[in-house]
Image (cartoon, rainbow, N blue to C red):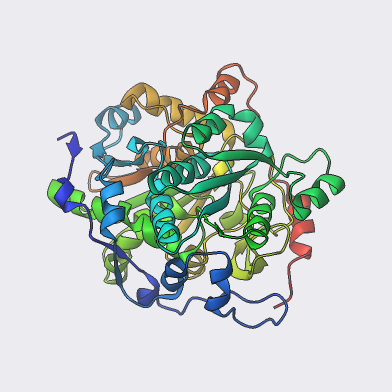
Amino acid sequence: MKKVLLNEEELPKQWYNVLPDLPEQLPPPVDPETKKPVDPAKLTAIFAEECVEQEVSTKRFIDIPEEVRKAYAMWRPTPLVRAYNLEKAIGTKAKIFYKNESVSPPGSHKPNTAVAQAYYNKKEGTKNLVTETGAGQWGSALSFAGAQFGLNVKVYMVRASFEQKPYRKLLMQSWGGNCLSSPTDQTEVGRRIRKEFPDTSGSLGIAISEAVEDALTHKNTKYAIGSVSNHVLLHQTVIGLETEKQLADAGVKPTIMIGCVGGGSNFGGFILPFFPRKMEGENIRFIAVEPKACPTFTKGEYVYDYGDTGKVTPMFKMYTLGSSFIPPAIHAGGLRYHGDAPILSLMKKLGLIEAQAYHQREVFEAGVLFARTEGILPAPETNHAIKAVIEEAKKASADDVIVFNFSGHGHFDLSAYDAYFSGRLEDYEYPEEEIKKALKNLPKI
């Protein structure tokens, strides 16, 4: 057996909402001025109303609109693949499977929520969507989704990635998106950051600030977010729900599930549908993998912090390195966020998920091995998951079934591979002093 496929009719009809199943209530977002929980109604100033309802919903399953399912059917269900050649190269006794999210039009898992958010905004009469993007996968996905529902899309792309990955900008343009290098001179936050740090490589925190400011200051404009938020992880559970059915069809149960983590959308969407099984006593390890240059889970603190550098968002209880922390310009731009999803942060605090961190060169080495054995060139972000898979497989037993989310391909990341092959790819040391400085600025809650 090589691939496990579902029929289009078996594409999930509902998303799974983990909130009612968490062992503790999720700490709510807090208003930075009042220090009290944010009224969800206030969030409709930037988000679609339906997305805000989903953010706090206590319904265990939420229907996927038929229009969204029709859009999903352009690439979903995605294949679950047995990585025989990788198993052989590692010399493992374990079985390794990967859920291939790279088959979507933008080449990653991101359109699972982009399509949903675009649909809800279109339904409510929104004309324009604004967002941020790290490596460009999210900006590409929202541009694609905007094209499906006739919405204008503006993307603030982190400067480091904007310069490293010009073809992502062209992909966004091809779908009608307008991509800008962040920080820009078009927002108050951007102008302030550029004045204070003229040579900054940018960060997701800065780009979020610009996008939210844009949404708040323009009519018929809403903000779309690619990770972190509850409703984003909800939409991404289509990945785990399909995986659960495919593994059952293959007659196997996962013992280790792995995904890379920046904000947490692909990892959360992958593992959350399996969470009830873990709580019922099934032996499943969930492993989140991040870069050592931006080690939020492994070095951050579980506290309330702003979701952005400009401090225009509410504060969230999450693992964070401090909203003012600007990580080094690693090629895994999608993993350069200072915080983690509140849902996953609570699970990490409770010991329900594990976290691992790796250097840049070693994860590219793992990605090259995957490309040479399984044939697909992975995205730099995905390489982190693959590195963890390899390390776990080396010590696994014949009873282990390792399943990971192949979150995206690396066809637009060839400059990063060029740097790797030419020996120019650097391992950035954990910037302890910078993180300590950023953590000192955490709000007091």
Q: The C terminus lies in which quarter of the figure?
A: bottom right
Query: Is the residue 84 above or below the residue 202 in the image?
Result: above
The image shows residue 70 at horizontal and vertical percentages of 26, 49
* Residue 29 occupies quadrant: bottom right
Q: Nearer the viewer, residue 226 or 338?
A: 226
Q: Does residue 287 show up? A: no
Which residue corresponds to the image point at 81% horizontal and 38% vertical from the top-left? 199
* Residue 2 occupies quadrant: top left
Which residue corresponds to the image point at 28% horizontal and 40% vertical from the top-left? 75
The image shows residue 121 at horizontal and vertical percentages of 45, 59
Question: Looking at this rendering, what residue extends furthest in the right direction?
Answer: 195
Q: The N terminus lies in which quarter of the figure?
A: top left
Q: Nearer the viewer, residue 75 or 396?
A: 75
- Position of residue 95 in the picture relative to residue 313 (left or right): left
Q: Does residue 307 show up? A: yes
Which residue corresponds to the image point at 37% horizontal and 78% vertical from the top-left? 58
Query: Is the residue 29 above or below the residue 151 in the image?
Result: below
Question: Looking at this rendering, what residue extends furthest in the top direction?
Answer: 422
Which residue corresponds to the image point at 61% horizontal and 60% vertical from the top-left? 219
